[in-house]
Image: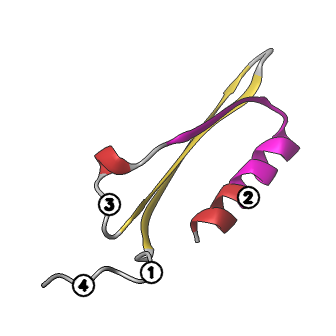
């Protein structure tokens, strides 16, 4: 008999990709994967048209959520 897991496993990998486009601002994609997930099960978060301050706030919020 298989027992149901009572908690989620720890975050194993975090991938942050950001680029700056002149006239548009920062674009960032954030993806994290837990130990029991495959990359196909993950959902990336994408943000665009960010200032530098907004970029740092988004990264901080996503890291806080993932960890």
Marks 4 and 1, how far apart at CA: 12 Å
Q: Residues within 10 Å of mark 2 (few under 14, many from 20)?
A: few
Q: Is residue 17 above or below residue 59?
A: above
* Horizontal arrangement in the rendering, residue 23 relative to residue 66 (left or right): right
Q: Earlier in the sequence, mark 3 or mark 1?
A: 1
Q: Look at discs 4 and 1 and give the one toward the viewer.
A: 4
The residue that disc 1 covers is 7
Residue at 64%, 64% (x, y): give it.
Answer: 65
Q: Where, by quadrant of the figure, is residue 4 drawn?
A: bottom left
Nearest to the eye among marks 4 and 2: give it: 4
Residue 26: x percent and y percent? Answer: 73, 31
Query: Picture coordinates of residue 16 (x, y %)?
Result: 55, 48
Secondary element type, mark 4? loop
Residue at 34% in and 49% down: 41
Circle nearer the N terminus (3, 2):
3
Closer to the eye: label 3 or 2: 3
Q: Which residue is mark 3?
A: 37
Tell me the crowding category of disc 4: few under 14, some 14 to 19, or many 20 or more residues within 10 angstroms, Cα based.
few
Please tell me which residue lies in front, 37 or 20: 37
Which residue reaches farthest front? 1
10 Å neighbourhood of mark 1: few (<14), some, or many (≥20)?
few
Label 3 residue SS: loop
Q: CA distance from mark 3 to mark 2?
A: 21 Å
Q: CA distance from mark 4 to mark 3?
A: 18 Å
Q: Is residue 61 magenta?
A: no
């Amino acid at each position: 008999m298989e027992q149901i897991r009572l908690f989620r496993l720890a975050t194993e990998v975090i991938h942050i990709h950001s680029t700056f486009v002149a006239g548009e601002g920062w674009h960032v994609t954030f993806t994290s994967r837990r130990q029991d997930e495959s990359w196909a099960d993950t959902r990336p978060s994408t943000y665009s048209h960010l200032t530098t301050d907004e970029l740092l706030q988004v990264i901080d919020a996503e890291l806080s959520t993932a960890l």
